[in-house]
Each structure stands twice: as structure tokens, then as C-alpha cells.
């Protein structure tokens, strides 16, 4: 296991325990290490988790930048999984809703729902449909 993965695993554990500040610190450190490793899909995954934590902590501007970067990386990687892309869109859509940007939130929920349907994650499909209904 590389040092970046050790940091990410520590961040995961901290987040699960509710220590979001520590989780953010170590996930961010893990993402920074991944930048030097030229592993874009792993970097995008870490950035998405960093953005999720930032969103939960109310760090909206920081979260938006990390969601945008993760999304751009995933879209540029043919090997990126549809589930990872859907999960990134989900978090980004939640952020857009909190910012009052319902147009972008609807677009993201719509795409996320289609991706969840494609990978047969019914809970994701259901959530996307609920959110789209609320945004109408």
C-alpha cells in the first residue's frame, strides 16, 4: 500500500467516526500525494471525497472547485467507472442545490440518475428521481 492510500484510508476511518476536520486534512494530503503519482482516476476519487467532506462542513467554494476538478478528470478518462461519475455528480448536485443553482442541480441529478440506472444502483436512481421531483 502506498502512502497516499494510507492517508485516504485514515481519512475514511475518521469520516466514518464523525471527525470531519481530521478526515478532510488526511484526504487532502492523500489527494496531494496522488497528484505527483499521475494516477488521475485515484486522484478524482480522492477529490470527490474531499469535496463531499467540504460540502458537509459548509466549505462551499472549496467543495465546488474539487467537484469540478474530479468531474473533469472522470470525463477525460475512458476507464473511469460510471458509478464513480454518478457519485461525483450526486455530491455536486447537492452542493448546487445548497447554492440555489437549481438548473445545474437538475442537470446533474438527471445525468447521475441515468448513470445509476446503467450500473443498476436502484437507491441512486430513486434518490435522483426524488431530487428531480423536488426541484421541479
Image (cartoon, grey):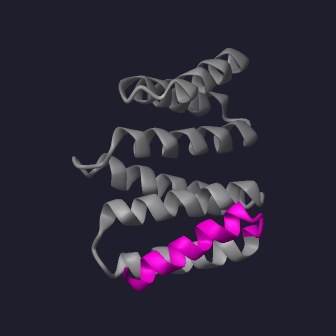
Viewer-nearest residue: 119 or 92:
119
Q: How many marks?
A: 0
Q: Nearer the viewer, residue 94 or 64?
A: 94
Residue 90 image point, x, y percent = 56, 39
Query: Which quadrant of the structure image shows residue 33?
Result: bottom left
Residue at figure coordinates x 66%, y 19% from the top left: 130
How far from the left and from the top, in percent, is residue 48? 52, 56
Figure quadrant of residue 65: bottom right
Residue 9 among those drawn in magenta: yes
For the magenta stretch, what is the residue range? 1-20
Q: Position of residue 24 (x, y in %)?
A: 65, 71
Residue closest to the far bottom: 3
Q: Main secondary structure of the magenta part?
A: helix
Depth check, front residue: 131 or 97: 131
Query: Which residue is most to the left?
Result: 78
On screen, residue 50 above or below 67: below
Q: Is residue 99 left or right of residue 126?
A: right
* Residue drawn where x is 64% and y is 69% of the image: 13
Q: In the picture provided, is 40 more to the left or to the right than 133?
A: left
- Horizontally, residue 37 falls left or right of residue 131, namely left
- Image coords of residue 95 (percent x, y): 66, 44
Q: Dividing the image into 4 quarters, which one contains the N terminus? A: bottom left
Amino acid at each position: 500500500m502506498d502512502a497516499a492510500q494510507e492517508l485516504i484510508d485514515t481519512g475514511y476511518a475518521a469520516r466514518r467516526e464523525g471527525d470531519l476536520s481530521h478526515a478532510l486534512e488526511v484526504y487532502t494530503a492523500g489527494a496531494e500525494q496522488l497528484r505527483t503519482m499521475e494516477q488521475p482516476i485515484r486522484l478524482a476519487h480522492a477529490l470527490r471525497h474531499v469535496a463531499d467532506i467540504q460540502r458537509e462542513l459548509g466549505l462551499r467554494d472549496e467543495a465546488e472547485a474539487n467537484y469540478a476538478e474530479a468531474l473533469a478528470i472522470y470525463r477525460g478518462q475512458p476507464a473511469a467507472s460510471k458509478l464513480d461519475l454518478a457519485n461525483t455528480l450526486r455530491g455536486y448536485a447537492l452542493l448546487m442545490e445548497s447554492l440555489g443553482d437549481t438548473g445545474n442541480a437538475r442537470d446533474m441529478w438527471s445525468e447521475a440518475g441515468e448513470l445509476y440506472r446503467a450500473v443498476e444502483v436502484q437507491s441512486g436512481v430513486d434518490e435522483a428521481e426524488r431530487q428531480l421531483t423536488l426541484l421541479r
